[in-house]
């Protein structure tokens, strides 16, 4: 068989296995990385022997490097500054103090659990600092935790990918290639990181100028914009690596300054105004999926099962200690504060799967070490891939179950439709402290909503799988706010019959359709009637309108169900005496009957109390009553 035929067979096999793995992963809602690694082992030399990566020869590291560049660029492109404001201090501590604790803690575990030398232990520790976006992002797509939790995990993944790549390479030169001296280690890390960031900023500036100020041809402008961004990712990586080599910053195995360059350029371009952003994002996603498939399958095919089995029980101890001791310790240390609940901190501790950077760099190091020190190479690859396997399987596969057990999936209000009505509703709900997610299918609308700080899930809200991924199973409210009554009716049916949501409300554009909604137990809000009621209130009840407007600006009205034993059995008079100033118990609802509360009425379990007053006072009343809103 000719070399050309061998390459064709290799590429076709890789893509076929990759597509199959992606389909299975989507159905099971598990990160595809797991199936890509298993597929790579199955078709590799130790499996069916359908592919042999050695056909790439010395070009394999360069091919893997360029592929990783695209993957890291994609992850950084989706990190928006407004999302990072959710937990800046905690995130900063995770990627600095947390990275250091991870390195040292993992090295200690490897040293004593596997009996490895300190050189190899420190190298493995540096590699396993990374918790990459290739596995974090798919988890966040299927587990609808609060935005601040998802953003923290995704940011940690992107930043630590860069840190781990450069740190591991510097550590490799430091402990194994004789480049001694701690000041030298720090200097090499800083110069490579600095060079990468500088090149990334330069490339991002050039691309921004070209896309915004150069005529790209009206007919093919979107296509040209996509290609320019792709070349920017590859160019940033290549230019940084070339400059590192030319200036003597790079070592024998390169510098990995290119990883820092693509992360910096991706982050900057993701946070500036770009034309054709929607087409660019879709194209990048498709390209990233292809290169991710290629890299993981090729690297996994190089894995020797004997490297895993040789670790014995020590390998099991090491993985358990890294995932159950080192990771929780660093997360609990770095997330001290008020941004996260204790349960959310535990969840972040439980989600630390490793991805592409440890796999690719460990394989590169093993190829370099194997001729002279096969035992060290086997320990390195075995330990890294065992951690990847176990963390992806357990943390990725059980991510939703862990979230449910820790109760960190919020009872969201889901608004389907991000137009004027949906946006206004989301604003009002967020002003009252609700966790709101907008489901929208239009790419331009999604971009505008995200720029304005809304949490948005992309997809058709009339489809069951889209609502499920948005968290409809745990939603307390679903509001269908599109301009299409048929779509709103279908959304209402799904919310009521499939997801059993407590409150389902729908916008009805044609008053003739109200009855159809009400027959399905969907609260129907007729657009025409709403306007008429508002105008009538202005005419007939101007005082109430002014009062409601004031409440809307500075006050709040909340209805809550009584669940606290401390409130049950009290009289309304006793409860009012315990409420803070500037809040009033306005309504008591029992068995769906509304009535003004009488001072002698005793509060029963399941009663609904409506509080009205200044926003902060209403919040204090809810906290005092210890009820669930």
Image (cartoon, rainbow, N blue to C red):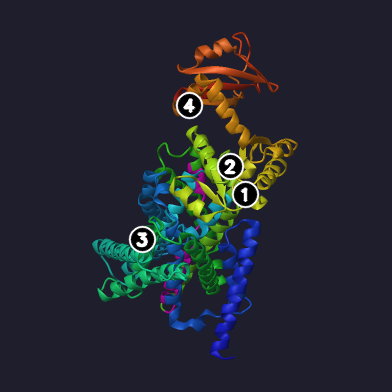
| Depth check, front residue: 312 or 4 | 4
Query: Which numbered disc, 4 or 1, marks the residue that appears first in the sequence?
Result: 1
Q: Mark 4 highlights which residue?
A: 549
Contact flag, marks 4 and 2 (Cβ < 8 Å):
no
Marks 1/3: CA–CA distance? 34 Å
Contact flag, marks 4 and 1 (Cβ < 8 Å):
no
Query: Which numbered disc, 4 or 3, marks the residue that appears first in the sequence?
Result: 3
Q: In this view of the protein, can residue 619 be seen by the observer?
A: no
Which region of the structure is painted magenta? 345-371
Q: Mark 2 highlights which residue?
A: 414
Dominant SS type (magenta): helix
Query: Which numbered disc, 1 or 3, marks the residue that appears first in the sequence?
Result: 3
- Name the mark nearer the viewer: 4 or 1: 4
Query: Which numbered disc, 1 or 2, marks the residue that appears first in the sequence?
Result: 2
Q: Is residue 598 above or below residue 180?
A: above
Q: Mark 3 highlights which residue?
A: 264
Q: Quadrant of residue 364?
A: bottom left
- Name the mark nearer the viewer: 1 or 3: 1
Marks 1/2: CA–CA distance? 10 Å
Contact flag, marks 1 and 2 (Cβ < 8 Å):
yes
């Amino acid at each position: 068989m000719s070399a050309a035929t061998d390459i064709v067979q290799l590429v076709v096999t890789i893509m076929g296995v990759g597509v199959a793995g992606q389909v299975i992963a989507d159905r099971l809602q598990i990160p595809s990385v797991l199936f890509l690694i298993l597929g790579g082992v199955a078709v590799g030399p130790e499996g069916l022997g359908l592919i042999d990566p050695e056909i790439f020869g010395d070009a394999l590291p360069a091919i893997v490097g360029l592929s990783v560049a695209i993957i890291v660029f994609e992850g950084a492109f989706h990190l928006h500054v407004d999302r990072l404001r959710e937990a800046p201090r905690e995130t900063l501590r995770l990627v600095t103090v947390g990275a250091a604790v991870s390195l040292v803690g993992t090295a200690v575990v490897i040293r004593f659990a596997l009996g490895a030398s300190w050189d190899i232990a420190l190298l493995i520790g540096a590699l396993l600092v990374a918790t990459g976006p290739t596995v974090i992002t798919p988890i966040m797509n299927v587990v609808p935790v609060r935005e601040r939790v998802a953003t923290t995990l995704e940011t940690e993944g992107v930043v630590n990918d860069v840190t781990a790549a450069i740190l591991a390479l510097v550590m490799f030169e430091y402990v194994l290639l004789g480049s001694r001296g701690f000041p030298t280690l720090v200097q090499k890390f800083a110069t490579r990181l600095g060079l990468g960031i500088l090149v990334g900023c330069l490339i991002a500036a050039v691309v921004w100028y070209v896309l915004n100020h150069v005529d790209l041809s009206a007919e093919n402008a979107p296509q040209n914009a996509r290609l320019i961004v792709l070349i920017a990712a590859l160019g940033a990586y290549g230019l940084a690596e070339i400059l590192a080599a030319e200036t003597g910053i790079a070592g024998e195995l390169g510098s990995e300054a290119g990883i820092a360059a693509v992360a910096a350029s991706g982050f900057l371009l993701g946070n500036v105004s770009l034309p054709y952003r929607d087409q660019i994002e879709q194209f990048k996603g498709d390209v990233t999926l292809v290169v991710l498939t290629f890299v993981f399958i090729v690297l996994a095919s190089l894995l020797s099962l004997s490297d895993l089995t040789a670790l014995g029980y020590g390998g099991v101890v090491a993985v358990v200690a890294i995932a159950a001791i080192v990771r929780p310790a660093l997360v609990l240390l770095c997330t001290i504060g008020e941004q996260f609940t204790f349960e959310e901190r535990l969840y972040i501790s439980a989600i630390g799967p490793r991805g592409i950077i440890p796999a690719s760099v460990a394989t590169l190091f093993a190829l370099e070490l194997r001729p002279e020190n096969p035992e060290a190479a086997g320990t390195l690859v075995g330990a890294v891939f065992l951690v990847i396997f176990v963390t992806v399987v357990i943390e990725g596969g059980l991510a939703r179950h862990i979230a449910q057990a820790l109760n960190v999936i919020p009872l969201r209000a889901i608004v389907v439709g991000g137009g004027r009505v949906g946006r206004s509703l989301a604003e009002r709900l967020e002003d009252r402290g609700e966790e709101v997610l907008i489901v929208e299918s239009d790419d331009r609308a999604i971009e505008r909503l995200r720029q304005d700080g809304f949490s948005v899930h992309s997809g058709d809200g009339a489809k069951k799988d889209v609502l499920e991924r948005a968290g409809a199973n745990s939603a307390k409210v679903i509001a269908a706010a599109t301009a299409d009554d048929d779509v709103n009716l279908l959304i209402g049916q799904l919310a009521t019959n499939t997801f059993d949501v407590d409150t389902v409300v729908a916008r009805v554009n044609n008053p003739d359709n109200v009855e159809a909604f009400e027959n399905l137990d969907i609260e129907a809000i007729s657009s025409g009637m709403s306007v008429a009621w508002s105008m009538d209130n202005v005419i007939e009840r101007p005082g109430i309108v002014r009062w409601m407007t004031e409440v809307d600006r500075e006050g709040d009205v909340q209805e809550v169900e009584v669940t606290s034993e401390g409130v049950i059995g009290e009289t309304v008079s006793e409860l009012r005496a315990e409420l803070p100033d500037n809040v009033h118990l306005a309504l008591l609802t029992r068995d769906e009957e509304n009535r003004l509360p009488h001072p002698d009425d005793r509060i029963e379990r399941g009663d609904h109390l409506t509080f009205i007053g200044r926003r902060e006072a209403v919040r204090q009343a809810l906290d005092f009553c210890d009820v669930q809103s």
